[in-house]
Amino acid sequence: MVPTFKEIEAWIADIPDPEIPVITIKDLGILRGVDYANGNYQITITPTYTACPAMKLIEDQIMENLSAKGIGNVKVNLTYTPAWTTDWISEDAREKLRKYGIAPPQHSSCIKTMGGRMPDPHCPRCNAANTSLISRFGSTACKAFYQCNNCKETFEQFKCH
Amino acid sequence: MTTTNYLYNYCLRLGDNALILGHRLSELCSKAPFIEEDLALTNISLDMIGRAQAMLKYAAEVEGKGNNEDHLAYRRAEINYYNHLIVEQPNGDFAHTIVRQLFVSAFELYMYSELEKSKDATLAAIASKTVKEVRYHLEHASDWVIRLGDGTPESHHRTQKAINELWMYTGELFEMDEVEMALLHEGIAVDLVPVKAQWHNHLKNVLSEATMMMPEDGYMQTGSRKGIHTENLGHILSEMQYLQRAYPDATW
Protein backbone atom coordinates (compact mmCIF):
# COMPACT_ATOMS: atom_id res chain seq x y z
CA MET A 1 0.00 0.00 0.00
CA VAL A 2 1.33 3.38 -0.95
CA PRO A 3 0.96 5.78 1.99
CA THR A 4 -1.04 8.94 1.40
CA PHE A 5 0.42 12.41 1.94
CA LYS A 6 -1.79 12.68 5.02
CA GLU A 7 -0.25 9.55 6.52
CA ILE A 8 3.26 10.73 5.71
CA GLU A 9 2.52 14.06 7.35
CA ALA A 10 1.11 12.34 10.43
CA TRP A 11 4.35 10.34 10.80
CA ILE A 12 6.50 13.46 10.95
CA ALA A 13 4.15 16.14 12.32
CA ASP A 14 4.86 15.21 15.94
CA ILE A 15 8.62 15.68 15.73
CA PRO A 16 9.44 18.02 18.60
CA ASP A 17 11.34 21.23 18.00
CA PRO A 18 14.89 20.43 19.19
CA GLU A 19 15.21 23.68 21.14
CA ILE A 20 11.67 23.91 22.57
CA PRO A 21 10.58 20.27 22.81
CA VAL A 22 7.07 21.00 24.12
CA ILE A 23 5.97 22.05 20.65
CA THR A 24 6.19 20.17 17.35
CA ILE A 25 7.41 21.18 13.91
CA LYS A 26 3.78 21.23 12.78
CA ASP A 27 2.75 23.46 15.73
CA LEU A 28 5.51 25.90 14.85
CA GLY A 29 4.63 26.06 11.17
CA ILE A 30 8.07 24.81 10.10
CA LEU A 31 6.58 21.84 8.22
CA ARG A 32 5.31 23.35 4.98
CA GLY A 33 4.20 20.38 2.91
CA VAL A 34 4.51 16.86 1.57
CA ASP A 35 4.69 16.13 -2.14
CA TYR A 36 5.91 13.47 -4.53
CA ALA A 37 8.21 14.21 -7.45
CA ASN A 38 10.99 12.49 -9.41
CA GLY A 39 10.54 9.23 -7.52
CA ASN A 40 10.94 10.86 -4.10
CA TYR A 41 8.72 12.08 -1.33
CA GLN A 42 9.50 15.77 -1.07
CA ILE A 43 9.14 17.20 2.41
CA THR A 44 9.34 20.98 2.54
CA ILE A 45 10.43 22.78 5.69
CA THR A 46 11.23 26.43 6.38
CA PRO A 47 13.64 27.85 8.98
CA THR A 48 12.38 30.18 11.69
CA TYR A 49 15.54 32.32 11.43
CA THR A 50 17.88 32.07 8.42
CA ALA A 51 20.62 30.51 10.54
CA CYS A 52 18.40 28.31 12.72
CA PRO A 53 20.85 25.60 13.84
CA ALA A 54 18.02 23.11 14.43
CA MET A 55 17.25 22.58 10.73
CA LYS A 56 19.77 19.79 10.18
CA LEU A 57 18.51 17.93 13.24
CA ILE A 58 14.90 18.29 12.07
CA GLU A 59 15.85 17.00 8.63
CA ASP A 60 17.60 13.96 10.15
CA GLN A 61 14.58 13.27 12.35
CA ILE A 62 12.23 13.38 9.36
CA MET A 63 14.42 10.86 7.50
CA GLU A 64 14.58 8.65 10.56
CA ASN A 65 10.82 8.65 11.21
CA LEU A 66 10.03 7.84 7.60
CA SER A 67 12.73 5.23 7.34
CA ALA A 68 11.17 3.50 10.37
CA LYS A 69 7.99 3.26 8.27
CA GLY A 70 9.95 1.72 5.43
CA ILE A 71 10.14 4.86 3.32
CA GLY A 72 13.64 5.55 2.06
CA ASN A 73 13.02 7.71 -0.99
CA VAL A 74 12.74 11.02 0.80
CA LYS A 75 14.15 14.43 0.01
CA VAL A 76 13.90 17.30 2.49
CA ASN A 77 13.79 20.73 0.83
CA LEU A 78 14.42 24.01 2.56
CA THR A 79 12.36 27.00 1.48
CA TYR A 80 12.65 30.67 2.50
CA THR A 81 9.38 31.75 0.98
CA PRO A 82 6.88 32.63 2.25
CA ALA A 83 9.05 33.83 5.14
CA TRP A 84 8.19 32.13 8.40
CA THR A 85 6.18 34.16 10.88
CA THR A 86 5.19 33.50 14.49
CA ASP A 87 1.58 34.05 13.32
CA TRP A 88 1.71 30.45 12.06
CA ILE A 89 2.09 29.08 15.58
CA SER A 90 -1.19 27.38 16.48
CA GLU A 91 -3.36 28.44 19.43
CA ASP A 92 -2.75 25.07 21.12
CA ALA A 93 0.99 25.55 20.79
CA ARG A 94 0.80 29.03 22.31
CA GLU A 95 -0.87 27.55 25.35
CA LYS A 96 1.81 24.82 25.52
CA LEU A 97 4.51 27.49 25.41
CA ARG A 98 2.88 29.47 28.22
CA LYS A 99 2.62 26.37 30.43
CA TYR A 100 6.27 25.62 29.71
CA GLY A 101 7.17 29.11 30.99
CA ILE A 102 7.71 30.89 27.66
CA ALA A 103 5.53 33.90 26.88
CA PRO A 104 3.98 33.25 23.45
CA PRO A 105 4.47 35.82 20.66
CA GLN A 106 2.00 38.63 20.01
CA HIS A 107 0.57 39.03 16.52
CA SER A 108 3.22 40.30 14.12
CA SER A 109 1.05 43.27 13.18
CA CYS A 110 2.33 44.99 16.32
CA ILE A 111 5.85 45.23 14.84
CA LYS A 112 6.54 48.80 13.83
CA THR A 113 9.33 49.33 11.34
CA MET A 114 11.04 51.81 13.64
CA GLY A 115 10.22 54.06 16.51
CA GLY A 116 7.36 52.03 17.95
CA ARG A 117 8.06 49.48 20.62
CA MET A 118 6.25 46.21 20.92
CA PRO A 119 4.03 45.89 24.00
CA ASP A 120 5.65 43.90 26.79
CA PRO A 121 4.33 40.34 27.13
CA HIS A 122 2.31 39.13 30.08
CA CYS A 123 4.17 37.00 32.61
CA PRO A 124 3.59 33.31 31.73
CA ARG A 125 3.56 32.41 35.45
CA CYS A 126 1.33 35.01 37.17
CA ASN A 127 -0.12 36.65 34.05
CA ALA A 128 0.85 40.17 35.23
CA ALA A 129 1.09 42.75 32.46
CA ASN A 130 3.82 44.66 34.28
CA THR A 131 7.00 43.11 32.83
CA SER A 132 10.36 44.55 31.70
CA LEU A 133 12.75 43.61 28.93
CA ILE A 134 16.11 42.43 30.27
CA SER A 135 17.72 41.37 27.02
CA ARG A 136 16.48 41.49 23.43
CA PHE A 137 18.41 38.33 22.73
CA GLY A 138 18.09 35.05 24.60
CA SER A 139 19.29 31.46 24.61
CA THR A 140 18.04 30.85 21.06
CA ALA A 141 17.54 33.10 18.03
CA CYS A 142 13.76 33.13 18.52
CA LYS A 143 13.60 34.27 22.16
CA ALA A 144 14.08 37.42 24.26
CA PHE A 145 14.52 37.64 28.01
CA TYR A 146 12.11 39.41 30.40
CA GLN A 147 11.43 39.86 34.08
CA CYS A 148 8.02 40.05 35.74
CA ASN A 149 7.76 43.08 38.03
CA ASN A 150 4.95 41.42 39.95
CA CYS A 151 6.23 37.92 40.86
CA LYS A 152 9.88 38.90 40.08
CA GLU A 153 10.46 35.71 38.05
CA THR A 154 12.53 35.99 34.88
CA PHE A 155 11.09 34.35 31.78
CA GLU A 156 11.69 33.96 28.07
CA GLN A 157 9.47 35.42 25.40
CA PHE A 158 9.02 33.90 21.96
CA LYS A 159 9.88 36.99 19.90
CA CYS A 160 7.23 38.25 17.57
CA HIS A 161 8.60 37.67 14.05
CA MET B 1 29.92 40.80 -18.89
CA THR B 2 26.70 38.83 -19.06
CA THR B 3 23.76 39.07 -16.66
CA THR B 4 24.94 35.80 -15.09
CA ASN B 5 28.35 37.30 -14.31
CA TYR B 6 26.74 40.41 -12.87
CA LEU B 7 24.36 38.37 -10.76
CA TYR B 8 27.19 36.18 -9.45
CA ASN B 9 29.11 39.29 -8.46
CA TYR B 10 26.04 40.88 -6.84
CA CYS B 11 25.38 37.77 -4.73
CA LEU B 12 29.01 37.75 -3.62
CA ARG B 13 28.74 41.40 -2.53
CA LEU B 14 25.66 40.69 -0.43
CA GLY B 15 26.99 37.41 0.91
CA ASP B 16 30.47 38.76 1.72
CA ASN B 17 29.04 41.68 3.68
CA ALA B 18 27.08 39.27 5.86
CA LEU B 19 29.95 36.81 6.21
CA ILE B 20 32.64 39.31 7.18
CA LEU B 21 30.58 41.30 9.67
CA GLY B 22 29.20 38.03 11.03
CA HIS B 23 32.78 36.89 11.56
CA ARG B 24 33.80 40.19 13.14
CA LEU B 25 30.93 40.01 15.63
CA SER B 26 31.72 36.38 16.43
CA GLU B 27 35.13 37.55 17.68
CA LEU B 28 33.24 39.07 20.62
CA CYS B 29 31.85 35.72 21.74
CA SER B 30 32.66 35.46 25.49
CA LYS B 31 34.41 38.87 25.33
CA ALA B 32 31.52 41.35 25.16
CA PRO B 33 31.19 43.90 27.99
CA PHE B 34 28.49 41.85 29.76
CA ILE B 35 26.54 38.66 29.24
CA GLU B 36 23.37 40.12 27.67
CA GLU B 37 25.46 41.96 25.11
CA ASP B 38 27.52 38.84 24.48
CA LEU B 39 24.28 37.05 23.56
CA ALA B 40 23.09 39.99 21.48
CA LEU B 41 26.23 40.40 19.36
CA THR B 42 26.61 36.68 18.74
CA ASN B 43 22.91 36.31 17.88
CA ILE B 44 23.31 39.09 15.33
CA SER B 45 26.45 37.33 14.11
CA LEU B 46 24.49 34.08 13.70
CA ASP B 47 21.76 35.79 11.67
CA MET B 48 24.43 37.24 9.39
CA ILE B 49 26.27 33.96 8.91
CA GLY B 50 22.94 32.29 8.05
CA ARG B 51 22.30 34.96 5.46
CA ALA B 52 25.85 34.60 4.10
CA GLN B 53 25.30 30.88 3.71
CA ALA B 54 22.08 31.41 1.73
CA MET B 55 23.64 34.13 -0.47
CA LEU B 56 26.87 32.27 -1.20
CA LYS B 57 24.96 29.06 -1.92
CA TYR B 58 22.97 30.97 -4.51
CA ALA B 59 26.13 32.64 -5.84
CA ALA B 60 27.65 29.20 -6.38
CA GLU B 61 24.52 28.04 -8.23
CA VAL B 62 24.61 31.12 -10.46
CA GLU B 63 28.33 30.62 -11.11
CA GLY B 64 27.62 27.03 -12.19
CA LYS B 65 31.14 25.69 -11.71
CA GLY B 66 30.30 23.06 -9.13
CA ASN B 67 31.32 25.18 -6.13
CA ASN B 68 29.27 25.36 -2.94
CA GLU B 69 28.94 28.06 -0.27
CA ASP B 70 31.89 26.70 1.72
CA HIS B 71 34.20 26.75 -1.30
CA LEU B 72 33.31 30.38 -1.89
CA ALA B 73 33.81 31.34 1.75
CA TYR B 74 37.04 29.46 2.39
CA ARG B 75 38.88 29.44 -0.93
CA ARG B 76 38.70 32.97 -2.25
CA ALA B 77 41.55 35.40 -1.69
CA GLU B 78 40.87 38.95 -0.51
CA ILE B 79 41.04 40.43 -4.02
CA ASN B 80 38.01 38.24 -4.85
CA TYR B 81 36.03 39.38 -1.82
CA TYR B 82 33.53 42.19 -2.38
CA ASN B 83 32.32 43.17 1.10
CA HIS B 84 32.13 46.86 1.98
CA LEU B 85 35.18 48.21 3.78
CA ILE B 86 33.12 49.19 6.85
CA VAL B 87 32.31 45.57 7.78
CA GLU B 88 35.97 44.53 7.92
CA GLN B 89 36.94 47.36 10.30
CA PRO B 90 38.10 46.15 13.72
CA ASN B 91 35.62 45.97 16.61
CA GLY B 92 37.59 48.62 18.52
CA ASP B 93 35.85 49.73 21.70
CA PHE B 94 32.14 49.05 22.27
CA ALA B 95 31.22 52.44 20.77
CA HIS B 96 32.94 51.46 17.49
CA THR B 97 31.25 48.06 17.42
CA ILE B 98 27.79 49.49 17.97
CA VAL B 99 28.13 52.56 15.71
CA ARG B 100 29.35 50.29 12.90
CA GLN B 101 26.29 48.12 13.54
CA LEU B 102 23.99 51.13 13.40
CA PHE B 103 25.43 52.28 10.06
CA VAL B 104 25.28 48.78 8.55
CA SER B 105 21.92 47.65 9.97
CA ALA B 106 20.18 50.84 8.83
CA PHE B 107 21.62 50.33 5.34
CA GLU B 108 20.55 46.69 5.35
CA LEU B 109 16.99 47.37 6.52
CA TYR B 110 16.26 49.87 3.76
CA MET B 111 18.23 48.03 1.07
CA TYR B 112 16.71 44.59 1.77
CA SER B 113 13.20 46.09 2.01
CA GLU B 114 13.70 47.06 -1.65
CA LEU B 115 15.35 43.76 -2.60
CA GLU B 116 12.17 41.96 -1.47
CA LYS B 117 10.64 43.31 -4.70
CA SER B 118 13.44 41.93 -6.89
CA LYS B 119 12.48 39.99 -10.02
CA ASP B 120 14.99 37.37 -8.93
CA ALA B 121 12.88 35.00 -6.81
CA THR B 122 15.78 33.65 -4.74
CA LEU B 123 17.11 37.10 -3.83
CA ALA B 124 13.58 38.26 -3.00
CA ALA B 125 13.04 35.23 -0.73
CA ILE B 126 16.31 35.70 1.16
CA ALA B 127 15.51 39.43 1.44
CA SER B 128 12.10 38.76 2.97
CA LYS B 129 13.71 36.76 5.77
CA THR B 130 16.57 39.22 6.19
CA VAL B 131 14.31 42.24 6.62
CA LYS B 132 12.68 40.71 9.70
CA GLU B 133 16.05 39.96 11.26
CA VAL B 134 17.82 43.26 10.54
CA ARG B 135 14.87 45.29 11.80
CA TYR B 136 15.62 43.81 15.19
CA HIS B 137 19.39 44.44 14.84
CA LEU B 138 18.73 48.05 13.96
CA GLU B 139 16.46 48.56 16.95
CA HIS B 140 19.19 47.19 19.19
CA ALA B 141 21.98 49.32 17.69
CA SER B 142 19.84 52.49 17.62
CA ASP B 143 18.89 52.11 21.29
CA TRP B 144 22.51 51.63 22.25
CA VAL B 145 23.77 54.67 20.35
CA ILE B 146 21.08 56.80 22.03
CA ARG B 147 22.02 55.39 25.44
CA LEU B 148 25.75 55.93 24.93
CA GLY B 149 25.40 59.36 23.38
CA ASP B 150 23.03 60.54 26.05
CA GLY B 151 25.06 58.81 28.79
CA THR B 152 28.24 59.90 30.58
CA PRO B 153 30.72 62.44 29.14
CA GLU B 154 33.07 59.51 28.45
CA SER B 155 30.49 57.41 26.57
CA HIS B 156 29.38 60.53 24.68
CA HIS B 157 32.95 61.36 23.68
CA ARG B 158 33.78 57.82 22.56
CA THR B 159 30.57 57.44 20.55
CA GLN B 160 31.16 60.73 18.73
CA LYS B 161 34.72 59.61 18.00
CA ALA B 162 33.44 56.31 16.55
CA ILE B 163 30.87 58.14 14.39
CA ASN B 164 33.51 60.50 13.05
CA GLU B 165 36.05 57.76 12.37
CA LEU B 166 33.61 55.39 10.64
CA TRP B 167 31.86 58.05 8.57
CA MET B 168 34.39 57.87 5.72
CA TYR B 169 33.35 54.24 5.10
CA THR B 170 29.65 55.06 4.58
CA GLY B 171 29.93 56.64 1.12
CA GLU B 172 30.77 53.27 -0.38
CA LEU B 173 27.49 51.73 0.78
CA PHE B 174 25.61 53.71 -1.86
CA GLU B 175 28.01 53.41 -4.81
CA MET B 176 26.45 52.00 -7.93
CA ASP B 177 28.77 50.65 -10.59
CA GLU B 178 28.30 48.74 -13.85
CA VAL B 179 27.13 45.58 -12.01
CA GLU B 180 24.39 47.30 -10.04
CA MET B 181 23.25 49.47 -12.95
CA ALA B 182 22.92 46.48 -15.29
CA LEU B 183 20.97 44.47 -12.70
CA LEU B 184 18.84 47.45 -11.76
CA HIS B 185 17.86 47.70 -15.41
CA GLU B 186 16.76 44.03 -15.26
CA GLY B 187 14.67 44.65 -12.13
CA ILE B 188 17.02 42.51 -10.03
CA ALA B 189 19.23 44.92 -8.05
CA VAL B 190 18.21 47.75 -5.72
CA ASP B 191 18.37 51.43 -6.64
CA LEU B 192 20.53 52.84 -3.85
CA VAL B 193 19.60 56.51 -4.37
CA PRO B 194 16.32 56.36 -2.40
CA VAL B 195 17.94 53.96 0.08
CA LYS B 196 20.55 56.61 0.86
CA ALA B 197 17.83 59.17 1.64
CA GLN B 198 16.08 56.75 4.03
CA TRP B 199 19.37 55.78 5.67
CA HIS B 200 20.33 59.41 6.13
CA ASN B 201 16.97 60.24 7.63
CA HIS B 202 17.10 57.36 10.10
CA LEU B 203 20.59 58.32 11.23
CA LYS B 204 19.64 61.96 11.58
CA ASN B 205 16.82 61.00 13.96
CA VAL B 206 18.88 58.57 16.03
CA LEU B 207 21.94 60.82 16.28
CA SER B 208 19.88 63.83 17.22
CA GLU B 209 18.13 61.86 19.99
CA ALA B 210 21.56 60.65 21.10
CA THR B 211 22.77 64.29 21.26
CA MET B 212 25.46 63.43 18.69
CA MET B 213 26.72 65.50 15.79
CA MET B 214 26.14 64.06 12.33
CA PRO B 215 29.36 64.50 10.32
CA GLU B 216 29.50 66.37 7.03
CA ASP B 217 30.37 64.18 4.04
CA GLY B 218 34.09 64.56 3.33
CA TYR B 219 36.60 62.22 1.76
CA MET B 220 35.08 58.75 1.38
CA GLN B 221 37.05 55.49 1.29
CA THR B 222 36.33 53.24 -1.67
CA GLY B 223 37.63 50.14 -3.44
CA SER B 224 35.75 47.05 -2.32
CA ARG B 225 33.58 46.86 -5.46
CA LYS B 226 36.85 46.07 -7.26
CA GLY B 227 38.20 43.80 -4.53
CA ILE B 228 40.51 46.45 -3.05
CA HIS B 229 40.41 46.28 0.74
CA THR B 230 41.93 47.73 3.88
CA GLU B 231 44.62 45.60 5.49
CA ASN B 232 42.04 44.24 7.95
CA LEU B 233 40.39 41.81 5.55
CA GLY B 234 43.57 39.78 5.01
CA HIS B 235 43.87 39.25 8.76
CA ILE B 236 40.25 38.11 9.02
CA LEU B 237 40.63 35.65 6.14
CA SER B 238 43.90 34.25 7.44
CA GLU B 239 42.08 33.23 10.59
CA MET B 240 38.75 32.26 9.04
CA GLN B 241 40.27 30.22 6.22
CA TYR B 242 43.15 28.68 8.13
CA LEU B 243 41.71 25.21 8.57
CA GLN B 244 40.61 24.77 4.96
CA ARG B 245 43.93 26.14 3.71
CA ALA B 246 45.96 23.85 5.97
CA TYR B 247 43.75 20.78 5.49
CA PRO B 248 41.88 21.16 2.17
CA ASP B 249 38.46 19.46 2.11
CA ALA B 250 38.57 18.63 5.82
CA THR B 251 35.07 17.88 7.14
CA TRP B 252 33.62 17.35 10.59
Image (cartoon, grey):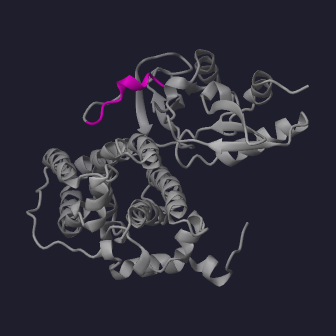
- The residue that appears at 58% across and 70% down in the rendered structure is B71
**Residue A71 picture quarter:** top right
Residue B174: image location, x then y, percent? 22, 60
- Is residue B183 or residue A141 the one in the foreground? B183
Q: Is residue B207 magenta?
A: no
**What residue span does the magenta drawing correspond to?**
A105-114
Q: Is residue A113 magenta?
A: yes
Q: Vertical placement of B111 versus A43: above or below?
A: below
- The residue that appears at 67% across and 79% down in the rendered structure is B248
Predominant SS along the magenta part: loop
- The residue that appears at 25% across and 60% down in the rendered structure is B181
Quarter of the image where the C terminus of chain A is located: top left
- Is residue B59 or residue A133 the one in the foreground? B59
| Residue B171 visible in the picture | yes
Residue A51: image location, x then y, percent? 55, 49
- Is residue B99 or residue A31 the one in the foreground? A31
- Is residue B59 or residue A86 the one in the foreground? B59
**Residue A89 picture quarter:** top right
Residue B128: image location, x then y, percent? 42, 41
| Residue B29 visible in the picture | no
- State left or right for residue B65 relative to residue B158: right
Residue B145: image location, x then y, percent? 25, 51
Q: Vertical placement of A30 versus B25: above or below?
A: above
Q: Vertical placement of A135 versus A107: above or below?
A: below
- The residue that appears at 70% across and 32% down in the rendered structure is A35
**Residue B216 picture quarter:** bottom left
